[in-house]
Image: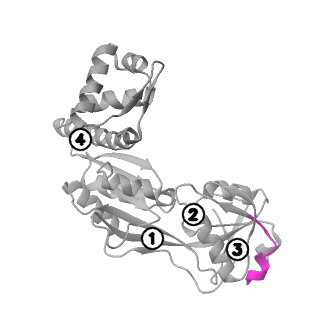
Amino acid sequence: MIDLRQLRYFVVVAEEEHVGRAAERLHISQSPLSRQIAQLEERLGLTLFERSQQRIRLTTDGRTFLSEARALLTHANRLESLGKRLGRGEEGGLCIGYIENAMHANILPAALSAVREVRPGVHVALYNLNSADQLEGLRQRSLDVALVSEPPANDDPDLDHFQLLEDPMLLALPQHHPLASVERLLPSDLQDQDWIGVKCSLAKDHHAAFIAACIRAGFTPQIRMEATEPYTALGLVAAGLGIAMTQKSLNQATHPGVVFRELPWLTFTMPLWAAWHRVNLRPLVETFRLILTGPEPLTLPRSTEPTSEARLH
């Protein structure tokens, strides 16, 4: 069985690309460190480093091994932390990945509040990651539950999922924009407007899906400016720099100077999914999953008629 200490030594040497600097970082001398790395290579039957007089570099196999070694050490550290919390009499912990929409729509805060009511001693660690990294975290067991915009495949052998939210989008306009007083907006009204796009790195397909939905509706948005998250986009809208589409779940936030309008003919939503590993090792994870999923997925209502001016208060 691989020695975790040797794995930690290997990771530090790989990061430093220098045995001397790695030894200083690990507070050991160079000779035993070199010996440990050599023993690890011998145990594996694998050359992990290309060595020269000045520095050492990972081989191709070494880079692949480094990725898996980091994942194993992450899980080992998490396991050690969990054991210590249990040893202190705490009720265990949850490691939860999420995208920003889970916060904006109040899905994650509400679920955490509910789980605290039944497990007041629970320790929660939150990780703001893109969907792909969250699903990989579930596979490596470094995450217990993931809140993602893109779920795993239905036939995924390891992961299961459930849709929590289908969040419709609203058009955000500056308060004094000419279109803010138009009763029934049409696709042609939006064709020549200056748009502010939201290109979030944590939901990589969101931007492309928005463009495709606009084209299906009959216009192509002229995006003059891009923001990385919706609240920044709303600030730009309030400043009169353009119009934007944003989730209906943000409508409860305070943002003066912005008017919201529904576009029933624009088929574009922001979905949110919960995902978890099919092999559930702890009752606490199952408790949180049941709180999250509930009997039915949450759908924010969408009227069939355009609303009058809806300002954030």
Give the residues drawn in magenta, as a range. Answer: 184-195
How many angstroms separate mark 1 from mark 4 (CA)?
A: 32 Å
Residue type of the residue flagged with mark 1: Leu
Q: Is residue 182 left or right of residue 294?
A: right
Picture layout, residue 57 above or below residue 236: above
Residue under circle 4?
Answer: 79
Image quadrant occupied by the C terminus: bottom right
Residue type of the residue flagged with mark 2: Leu
N-terminal of the pair, mark 4 or mark 2, is: 4
Residue type of the residue flagged with mark 4: Leu
N-terminal of the pair, mark 3 or mark 2, is: 2
Picture layout, residue 262 above or below residue 242: below
In contact (CB < 8 Å): disc 1 and disc 4 = no
Residue under circle 1?
Answer: 165
Q: Position of residue 303 (x, y in %)?
A: 57, 83
Q: Residue at x 32, y 68 (%)?
A: 156
**For discs 3 and 2, the disc positioned in front in the rendered view:** 2
Residue under circle 2?
Answer: 250
